[in-house]
């Protein structure tokens, strides 16, 4: 049983909950580094929690241990007593001091024993901090020492244990470190990156995290040591980092610098009140010169914490909304080094594709980089496969050229005959029948606003109409039966592939369309909805739809097999918990709606996947599939909201 629960996700990014003896940590979370000596701390942990909602902190067990007065209080009243804080406290081991000062006189056993003795909620193994410049043999050796210490630490600790992931600049060592740490730790803490953060070497930073990421167990919280500038939070979360810690708020305050999500502002010479947060309203930034150096530092530290807490909240909100990529694209414009880091991430889509959701509510083009998102890569690959499957070009019916239905005009037209209606979209050529599919369907980009009102190339429309005057809106509804058939085929093939679609009785199926936009809203048979088509332009089976699928193509339909113990709950509409998943077909993707069956293939329900098939067996806590339709009572057709028309 692990202590991390995944609640919501946006690709690799997760919103989760880590349970500790002093309460849960809602992730992604910033754990501010606090000094163990309350007299030297610019803001108390209690204030951080009560005023800013920062519920957990990290402190140095080593600095506490080294100071006889602090260590005496900590041993007597616990670390919670010393910090006067009853929320979750993570302790660090002293590895960083070892790195900074050359050596520390504490042994790994003493470090762990002390963290245990003072009641740390999350204790950290004394690792070997590996510099990014370390030669390979150094990095490899440090890694093995760290792992050996971690194994011994585990044997002596029943509470939560953070195991650092080192490996320097060597991807294979990062991978090995991540793999081995996953066997031992509750919190997997990517370390050795502080120099990269300090020197804006973000490309190397994301390479280090990316190399470790696929090898980190999905049911453990992931920590990134030292990432405390708010401009790095969204990027870190995008890579699946759950916990951030840093002393950046105080370090920058000492230098007289204000942290904001898109950079750092020196307050010297500031003539405008660029922050109106509650703290800066009370004590305007332009008047900080009147304060003593100490008071100014306290003010800046508190503002920096507030700005950091706020940014972390935005990151969590973006994960809830499925808009984290947009936030990252905006944040990375803060510095070319961050843009370079994002670019290096989008050049490795394979990192993201296994957990990339099948749909999101929206797709907003933020920068030129937006079109390189993994969702676009995944879509383009599927479109390519879909088009390649068309063995013989088939004659397609004319389509309803309703401007509100079409955003782009088909341009492939051989010998004057429409063989394949393809739209040149900003995300590449897309068959017309798939034009509503995520991400091209909800795509909102520059093109819509650059060309006057309608993005359709009017000349192309006119030449099509000249060639065949029967095309277009004045054809009434005669286009519909043919085009319906094409779309039913396309939507189901997109979802299930040609093999399964061949076995379905397509001729029996009908579509329901939105009257206003003509978009397909559902696919039905005998008046019963079998698939519902959302704003993602994809077909999601109802319970009835799953019945049809399983009876037409038994054994072929990608599905989730539920443990008998949970079968009746699922059949009654309760969520399927990860620990009750017996098997999940590898063809399933996050956010898809799939049939849930018992081990004898009896259909229990249909539901939306929160986890990727590879994760389902490996998460001991939390929901794997949210049931959307089930056996005990027939599902209602959920009315889909009408899409917002772009051009009125
Ligand atoms: N603090 C910043 N970096 C590190 C690291 O690599 N290991 C540990 N234990 N603490 C850190
Ligand atoms: Zn402020």
Image (cartoon, rainbow, N blue to C red):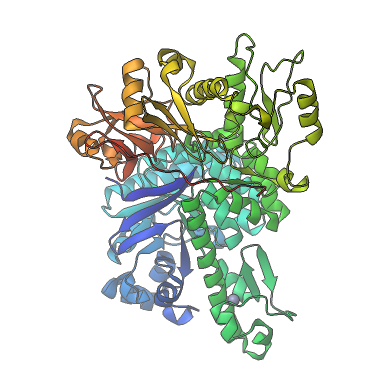
487 or 364: nearer the eye?
487
At 67% from the left and 87% from the top, the residue drawn is 287
Q: Where 482 sits versus 198, above or below?
A: above
556 or 356: nearer the eye?
556
Q: Where 530 sits versus 312, above or below?
A: above
In the picture, measured across the screen, residue 468 lies left or right of residue 68, that is right
At 82% from the left and 32% from the top, the residue drawn is 459
Position in image of residue 64 (x %, y %): 40, 70
Position in image of residue 157 (x %, y %): 28, 53
In the picture, measured across the screen, residue 577 lies left or right of residue 7, that is left
Total tally of numbered discs in the picture = 0
**Residue at the top extreme of this rendering:** 392
The image quarter containing residue 378 is top right
321 or 59: nearer the eye?
321
Task: Indicate which quadrant contains ligand 2.
Answer: bottom right
Position in image of residue 374 (x %, y %): 58, 37
The image quarter containing residue 570 is top left
Quarter of the figure with the N terminus? top left
Q: Where 349 sits versus 163, above or below?
A: above
At 74% from the left and 19% from the top, the residue drawn is 413
- Residue 193 shows in the view: no
In the picture, measured across the screen, residue 342 lies left or right of residue 85, that is right
In the picture, measured across the screen, residue 527 lies left or right of residue 203, that is left
- Residue 60 shows in the view: yes
Position in image of residue 431 (x %, y %): 63, 25
């Amino acid at each position: 049983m692990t202590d991390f629960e995944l609640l919501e996700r946006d690709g690799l990014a997760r919103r989760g909950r880590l349970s500790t003896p002093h309460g849960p940590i809602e992730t992604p979370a910033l754990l501010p580094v606090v000094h163990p000596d309350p007299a030297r701390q610019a803001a108390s942990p209690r204030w951080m929690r009560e005023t800013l909602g920062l519920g957990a902190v990290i402190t140095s067990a080593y600095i506490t241990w080294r100071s006889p007065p602090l260590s005496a209080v900590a041993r007597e009243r616990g670390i919670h007593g010393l910090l006067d804080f009853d929320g979750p406290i993570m302790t660090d081991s002293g590895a960083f001091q070892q790195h900074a000062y050359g050596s520390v006189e504490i042994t790994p056993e003493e470090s762990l024993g002390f963290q245990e003795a003072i009641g740390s909620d999350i204790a950290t193994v004394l690792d070997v901090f590996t510099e990014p410049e370390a030669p390979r043999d150094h990095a490899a050796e440090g890694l093995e020492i760290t792992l050996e210490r971690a194994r011994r630490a585990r044997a002596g600790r029943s509470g939560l244990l953070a195991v650092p992931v080192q490996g320097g600049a060597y991807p294979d060592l990062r991978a090995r470190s991540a793999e081995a740490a996953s066997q031992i730790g509750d919190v997997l803490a990517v370390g050795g990156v502080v120099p990269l953060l300090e020197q804006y070497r973000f490309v190397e930073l994301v390479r280090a995290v990316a190399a470790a990421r696929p090898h980190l167990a999905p049911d453990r919280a992931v920590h990134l040591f030292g990432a405390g500038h708010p401009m790095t939070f969204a990027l870190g979360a995008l890579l699946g980092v759950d916990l951030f810690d840093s002393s950046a708020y105080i370090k920058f305050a000492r230098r007289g610098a204000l942290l904001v999500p898109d950079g750092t502002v020196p307050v010297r010479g500031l003539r405008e009140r660029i922050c109106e947060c509650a703290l800066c309203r009370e004590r305007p930034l332009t008047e900080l010169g009147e304060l003593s150096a100490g008071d100014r530092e306290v003010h800046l530290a508190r503002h920096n914490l507030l700005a950091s807490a706020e940014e972390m909240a935005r990151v969590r909100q973006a994960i809830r909304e499925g808009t984290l990529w947009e936030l990252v694209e905006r944040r990375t414009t803060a510095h070319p080094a961050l843009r370079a880091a994002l670019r290096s991430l989008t050049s490795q889509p394979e990192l993201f594709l296994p957990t990339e959701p099948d749909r999101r509510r929206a797709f907003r083009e933020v920068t030129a980089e937006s079109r390189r998102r993994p969702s676009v890569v995944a879509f383009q690959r599927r479109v390519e496969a879909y088009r390649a499957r068309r063995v013989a070009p088939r004659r397609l019916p004319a389509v309803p050229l309703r401007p509100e239905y079409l955003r782009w005009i088909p341009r492939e037209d051989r010998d004057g005959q429409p063989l394949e209606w393809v739209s040149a979209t900003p995300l590449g050529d897309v068959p017309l029948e798939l034009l509503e599919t995520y991400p091209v369907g909800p795509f909102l980009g520059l093109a819509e606003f650059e060309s006057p009102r309608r993005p359709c190339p009017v000349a192309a429309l006119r030449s099509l109409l000249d060639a065949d005057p029967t095309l277009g809106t004045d054809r009434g509804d005669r286009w519909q039966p043919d085009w319906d058939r094409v779309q039913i085929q396309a939507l189901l093939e997109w979802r299930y592939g040609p093999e399964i679609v061949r076995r379905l009785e397509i001729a029996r199926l009908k579509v329901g369309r939105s009257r206003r936009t003509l978009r397909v809203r559902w696919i039905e048979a005998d008046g019963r909805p079998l698939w519902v088509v959302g704003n993602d332009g994809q077909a999601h089976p109802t319970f009835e739809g799953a019945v049809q699928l399983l009876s037409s193509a038994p054994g072929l339909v990608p599905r989730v097999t539920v443990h008998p113990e949970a079968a009746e709950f699922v059949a009654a509409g309760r969520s399927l918990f990860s620990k009750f998943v017996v098997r999940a077909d590898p063809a399933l993707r996050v956010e898809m709606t799939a049939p849930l069956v018992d081990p004898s293939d009896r259909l229990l329900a249909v539901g939306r996947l929160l986890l990727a098939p590879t994760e389902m067996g490996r998460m001991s806590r939390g929901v794997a599939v949210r049931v959307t339709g089930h056996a005990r009572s027939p599902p209602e057709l959920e009315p889909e909201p009408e899409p917002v028309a772009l051009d009125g």
